[in-house]
Amino acid sequence: MSTHIPADRRANRRTSPRLAGRRVAITGGTSGLGLALVEEALARGAHVAFVARRREGIDQVMRRWPEAHGIAGDVARKEDIHPTAIQLASALGGVDVLINNASSLGPVPLMPLADTDCEDFEHAIAANVLGPFRLTKALLGSLAAAAREGRGGLIVNISSDAAINAYPNWGAYGTSKAALLHMTRIWQEELGSIGVRSISFDPGDMDTPLHAAAVPDADRAALKSPATSARELVELIEDMLTKTSPSLAGALRERAER
């Protein structure tokens, strides 16, 4: 089954405090959608830890939201993954929801695949595919424990319509997001037996620094605000968390205790 949630099918969801007390980890949390997700999750009472590459951006977010836990790390760097995962789990006391949001466009300005340097293509793959793969794998124990306890166990990978549609000059980004989308579907099929769910979320075209770098001449008035997309995603997460079956959580807990 498809786990991809298109941008145009998520309007008019109910708002409720169902995220209160949940432990949410977010990558790329200092700008764009990531920052909006940090703010939205905190406003709904979640415990939030976020990851970003630059310490100054982390400090700025934490001055505004001192209850958040900011962690310096680059998900595109293999050597950063385990220290980042350890700090996320330690800061939150476990992870109920992992949002793999950090992303790379590849070459900027955008260019045809034939003109893309191998190093730029490799970086897009490292940030958009290998980073989420490694971090999810490193946090899988925490996510499985959350599922057993009936707290969550949800992986959210931020996708794009470029994962489905072939756009000229978006080759590095689109290829990496397509791989991420299919990896999400495989995680969903493989992890169901331990109660961990995996979904892909397309937030739509947003007014973010990433979009501005990709399409500098875009009409910003025609773009969604990151806050709107963050609200849609958080409401979807709340719906999914409250649909966790107590009987499933009990069965998983019983199996783990055998």
Image: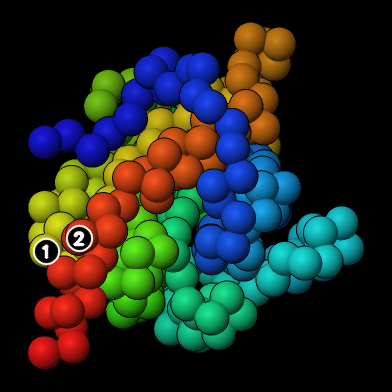
| Residue topped by disc 1 | 193
Is 160 or 78 nearer to us in this picture? 160
Task: Judge from the rendering whether residue 157 lies leftward or rightward of residue 105; answer left or right.
Answer: left
Is residue 133 positioned above or below 41 on the image?
below
Task: Judge from the rendering whether residue 35 lies leftward or rightward of residue 239; answer left or right.
Answer: right
Q: Find residue 53 and report its image quarter.
A: bottom right
Task: Judge from the rendering whether residue 1 lies leftward or rightward of residue 67; answer left or right.
Answer: left
Q: What's under tag 1, amino acid-wise? A: Ser
Report the mark closest to the observer, 2 or 1. 2
Residue at (11, 90) in percent of width and height: 258
Question: From where the camera sits, is residue 60 visible?
Answer: no
Task: Judge from the rendering whether residue 40 lies leftward or rightward of residue 63; answer left or right.
Answer: left
Is residue 254 positioned above or below 128 on the image?
below
Residue at (18, 71) in percent of width and height: 252
Question: From where the camera sits, is residue 90 visible?
Answer: yes
Which x, y percent locates residue 21? 59, 62
Q: Find residue 217 and report its image quarter.
A: top right
Q: What's under tag 2, amino acid-wise? A: Leu
Earlier residue among tags 2 and 1? 1
Which x, y percent locates residue 8? 41, 16
Is 152 or 30 nearer to us in this picture? 152
Residue at (57, 76) in percent of width and height: 92
Q: Which circle marks residue 245 in the picture?
A: none
| Residue topped by disc 2 | 248
Helix, strand, or loop for circle 1? helix
Q: CA distance from mark 2 to mark 1?
A: 10 Å
Is disc 1 surrounded by few (<14), some (14 to 19) or many (20+) residues within 10 Å? few
Which x, y percent locates residue 106? 45, 45
Residue at (72, 47) in percent of width and height: 43
Is residue 143 positioned above or below 203 on the image?
below
